[in-house]
Image: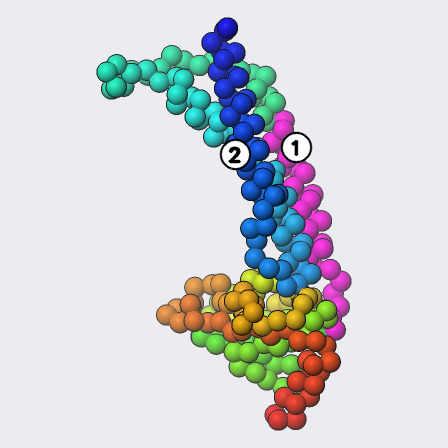
Amino acid sequence: MDRRLVDWIWFGTLWVLLTAVGEFLVLGLDLLPARWSAEADVVDDAYILLMALAVPIFAGVAAALFVSLVRFRVQVDGIPTEDGPPVHTNRRVVRLWLASTLMLALMVTVNPGFIGLAELRGEPSADLVVEVQAQRWSWKVTYPDGAETWNQLYLPADQRVRFDITSLDILHSFWIPAFRVKLDAVPGRTTSLYVTPEGIGSFDDDFNLRVQCAEICGLGHSNMAMPVTVLEADEFDAWLNDLAEGA
């Protein structure tokens, strides 16, 4: 059998095996943390799609490298003495690779690119507006009617929340891992982020239910976190009324 054909058979077999293993890990196993918001579904679906598309590309490159290392090395007594024989470009493979990767890039630009961003942003309307103010190294949360909490965030489930985020000193980043959302807190500027929490829980149930600063902001950066508690809508209203009366 032609040696070149054997090389292609080894490459193709290894490519298929690596692709199958990779796709099983991406699609067959649930490796992502729990989702606590509608936006988390959008982000996770986009992540899984991109990983599934990337697996064959990575597997192809890995298979080509492995076959090349085994097939095209030249050694005498275990010590390389010269370069291996030249391998001329296969123009059909190059054209196919360029065409396929170009189509893939255009596809992911549309979805999950433009489509995913549109789903994340959604309609600019909210059932609740919460103001978040960052400063080294703490968070201040202001609810309707002026009620405030420090380093504690309470939210109602299944209601669209708009966070108006700013900073008093330097650049911080408002990140809730369980919601898969993140936005910078910029001094002198208010930025808005929309989230729809789903499920009832707290930091005690899932350590990802927290606001974590994701922008290095000094010595206390790693401790700049606050737990998030998601309540039923009526429980949240009762909690907010008690907080407002206490204020």
Is residue 57 visible to us here?
no
Tag 2 and tag 1, C-beta contact below 8 Å: no
- What residue is shown at x 59% (from left), y 50% (from top)? 30
Q: Quadrant of residue 235?
A: bottom right
Examine the image and state in which quarter residue 39 appears: bottom right
The amino acid type, in three-letter code, at marker 1 is Met
Residues in magenta, as a range: 99-127
Name the element at disc 2. Answer: helix
Of callouts 2 and 1, the N-terminal one: 2
The numbered disc on residue 103 is 1
Instruction: Name which residue lies at 62% across and 52% down.
Output: 44
Q: Is residue 12 above or below residue 211?
A: above
Q: Is residue 49 magenta?
A: no
Quarter in which the C terminus is drawn: bottom right
Q: Is residue 93 visible?
A: yes
Main SS, magenta region, reads helix
Residue 180 position (above or below residue 236): above
Q: In the drawing, does residue 114 fall left or right of residue 56?
A: right
Residue 189 x %, y %: 58, 70
Residue located beneath label 2 in the image: 58
Picture coordinates of residue 59, whole percent (x, y): 52, 32
Q: Nearer the viewer, mark 2 or mark 1?
A: 2
Q: How many marks?
A: 2
Residue 51 in the image, given as x and y percentages of width and height: 58, 42
Residue at horizontal 54%, vertical 29%? 17
| Element class at badge 1 | helix
Residue 130 or 230: which is nearer the viewer?
Answer: 230
Q: Is residue 144 above or below residue 73?
A: below
How far is disc 2 from disc 1 in space, using C-alphas? 17 Å
Q: Looking at the image, which is closer to me, 127 or 68?
A: 68
Disc 2 residue type? Phe
